[in-house]
Image (spheres, rainbow, N blue to C red):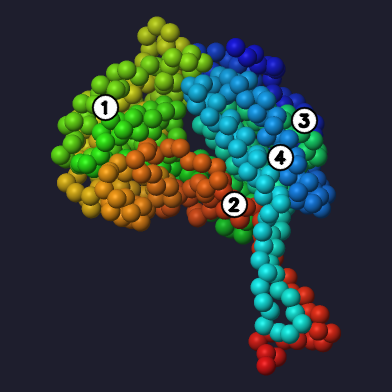
Amino acid sequence: MVEVKTKKLANFINGEWIDVEKTAPVINPATGETILDVPLSDSASVNKAVEAAKSAQKEWALVPAPQRAEVLYRVGYILKERKEELAQLLTMENGKVIEEARGEVQEGIDMAFYMAGEGRRLFGQTTPAELKDKFAMSVRAPIGVVGIITPWNFPIAIATWKSFPAIVAGNAVVWKPATETPIMAYELARVFEEAGLPKGVINVVFGSGTEVGNAMVNHDDIRVISFTGSNEVGRNIAAECGRQLKKVSLEMGGKNAVIVMEDADLDLAVEGILWSAFGTSGQRCTACSRVIVHENVKTALEERLLAAMEKLTIGNGLDTSNRVGPIINKPGIEKIKKYIEIGKGEGAKLLAGGYELTDGDLANGNYFAPTLFTDATASMRIAQEEIFGPVVSLIPVKSFEEAIEVNNGVTFGLSSSIFTRDVNRVFKAQRDLDTGIVYVNAGTTGAEIHLPFGGTKGTGNGHRDSGIQALDVYTEWKSVYVDFSGKLQRAQIDVE
């Protein structure tokens, strides 16, 4: 098993590792053991990071984009070489099972190579001008200093979704990672350093949202904030950025549903539900927390789900025999417990789970039994609010049309899924499901990095991570007109 190289992390500012006196412990959620200490920085550290980023960005923007891309190619190769080491460290700090951690590191590798490719594209447009001897085009321009705020549940993947397009587009980055999972930020900064990224182009400031996050949002020289996290915090960030006329990209919660129609392959649907609901212990914004099932197959689906859930192995994610890992911390456990009581009080029937696991090897970690409610209604809080744990509720419906209505009847709009053999329903579903991501005969998780990631309604504010659409967050469009007529020509006026 890999060992942690340090017992105390430091901020990474202008290419230097800077100690911070105030720290907090980082706890392994599988064992309850302290891994290391993470800095709790203040606004002064943010100011230093922004100063470094602002200075570095002026030079970085002048580097040709294909050369900027070469750094990302090197980052990708280093991540590939260190994939297993990074995956084990990720599991230690986050808890997700090792195969998921390997998959997450692979996302970072994929994103490095994908965004490096954009260094030879970053396409603009050329268009005909309406006047003679005049040329018209649009180009992408970097914005300047970008602030990214990332969550604990995907501590390296989401950071690469945000930082790589920002960097290849010619910006500099100030990054606040989650204090629960800072090791991936430390390791990624080391990778950037090894890959030869100039000093100050990436800066990592550890600390709380209250101190570091707020300082970033309110800093005049940070012109973009990209945030992934809770809806409540995202709304506050959006309000403050709006006041400052600062660009903001938000990716927030989900209340994602798998629809199982009466003609579905039930065994395949069970596999999709298990993976979507209990992978990462349900701690994904794309996790399935609702199963909208046609009443004709409800009983059969319940029986198969219960049988499959009994076979789930739960424990430390470094043990490859385990399928479900721990909850990130004790407050996460308490939140799940609260929703179990809410569900029972609302009249949903608890079929499995609903309790914390504290016996034997699980005693020192944060474990919660995979939980299944049935006979839920669409209006129940457990069917409306994000729980962020291994809890799924079955909602029976009478028709395809009702299934679509129930899916759309929540405030979030991230991911949705339908299991059916009817091609007509497939095309209607992909049209009518009001989510940013739609899966057919698959669960609600599994996004690929070359397509845009994000959602509608309360899930976000219209921007997207991943895909070429991510470049829109970190660039401004600049229109350029070149008049080679040798005389003043006035658009819309001097048109013959």
Mark closest to the chain's N terminus, 1 or 4: 4
Residue depicted at x 41% and y 53%: 457
**Residue 295 point in image, percent of width and height:** 16, 40
Q: Which mark is residue 305?
A: 1
Mark closest to the chain's N terminus, 3 or 2: 3
The Cα atoms of the two marked residues, 1 and 3, are separated by: 47 Å
Q: From the image, which quarter does the C terminus lie in?
A: bottom right
Q: Residues within 10 Å of mark 2 (few under 14, many from 20)?
A: some
**Residue 337 point in image, percent of width and height:** 34, 26
The Cα atoms of the two marked residues, 3 and 2, are separated by: 26 Å
- Residue at the bottom extreme, as displayed: 496
The Cα atoms of the two marked residues, 2 and 1, are separated by: 38 Å
Q: Quadrant of residue 84?
A: top right
Residue depicted at x 58% and y 15%: 34
The Cα atoms of the two marked residues, 1 and 4, are separated by: 43 Å
Q: Quadrant of residue 201?
A: top right
The Cα atoms of the two marked residues, 2 and 4, are separated by: 16 Å
Left or right: residue 15 compared with residue 427: right
The amino acid type found where label 3 is placed reads Glu
49 or 494: which is nearer to us? 494
The amino acid type found where label 4 is placed reads Leu
Residue depicted at x 40% and y 17%: 314
Q: From the image, which quarter does the N terminus lie in?
A: top right
**Residue 451 point in image, percent of width and height:** 52, 48
Answer whether labels 3 and 2 touch (C-beta < 8 Å): no
Residue depicted at x 35% and y 33%: 272
Q: Which mark is residue 72?
A: 4
Mark closest to the chain's N terminus, 2 or 4: 4
List the residue tagged with mark 2: 468
Q: Is there any visible trace of residue 212 in the rendered image?
A: no
The amino acid type found where label 1 is placed reads Leu
List the residue tagged with mark 3: 194
